Amino acid sequence: MSATSEIRIREVHEAPWPDVESVFRVVRDASTCWCQWFKVSRSEFREREGEGHRACLEESAKRPETSPGLLAYRDGRPAGWVAVEPRPRYSRLRRSRNLKLAEPGIDLDDGSVWSVTCFVVPREHRGQGVTRALLDGAVALARRRGAAAIEGYPVDTATARASSDALYVGVLSTFLAAGFSEVSRMGATQVLVRLPLR
């Protein structure tokens, strides 16, 4: 990040909707998913792909009580997105066999645990500290809202190569640098990490 770059984080319900669209529409997978993958079943996801997902995100982004994430601004321009909410709002996580195997006995309905599920950072803003600023913002938001812990499911790029499309969940090194600890492995490259907040 250059010495003159400034990154600011806003809750999405406080940001103009066109700013959100400007981040999502320039990243191929994001422009079809709109951060709905973890929220619906596979069949529902296929049924409303694209504009249906966009409408769902826009609707949830209108109100503080359903606000699904944070938007980053770099030098005043929309530069990235992170999805962060209480874990039970992500129905796919609540049904996740990988999570149950990674941590036997885990209570996936525990609303005091928040989840970071997705980052969207347009290419021109990558490598500028945007992802780390978004993750720090997610931690701060969860803490303000009284969460007991926040977790993520990043990819360990030190153990295997991954395409940029697979890195939407974040990179392990970023989470570790932000104070998260590895809980367990969820396969060859994905890791369950958590940060206690109380």
Image (cartoon, grey):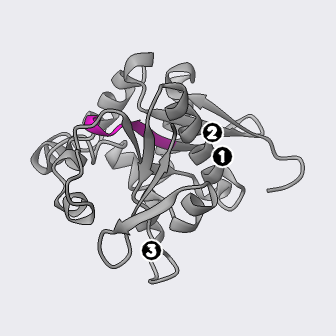
Assign a secondary structure to mark 3: loop
Residue 55 screen position, x and y as percent: 31, 28
Decide whether the magenta segment is chiefly helix, strand or loop: strand
Q: Dot 2, crowdedness within 10 Å: few (<14), some or many (≥20)? A: many
Mark in the foreground, 3 or 1? 1
Say above or below: 151 vs 143: below
Disc 2 and disc 1 in contact, CB within 8 angstroms:
yes
- Magenta residues, as a range? 82-89
Badge 3 amino acid: Ser
Residue 113 screen position, x and y as percent: 37, 39
Badge 2 amino acid: Ala
Say above or below: 62 vs 99: above
Distance between mark 3 and mark 1 Cα atoms:
22 Å
Assign a secondary structure to mark 1: helix
Which residue is pictured at 53% across the width and 56% down the height? 180
Q: Is residue 26 left or right of residue 57?
A: right
Distance between mark 2 and mark 1 Cα atoms:
8 Å
- Residue carrying label 2: 72
Which circle's residue, 3 or 1, is located before the other in the chain?
Answer: 1
Task: Indicate whether residue 86 is drawn in magenta.
Answer: yes
- Residue carrying label 3: 163
Residue 108 screen position, x and y as percent: 23, 44
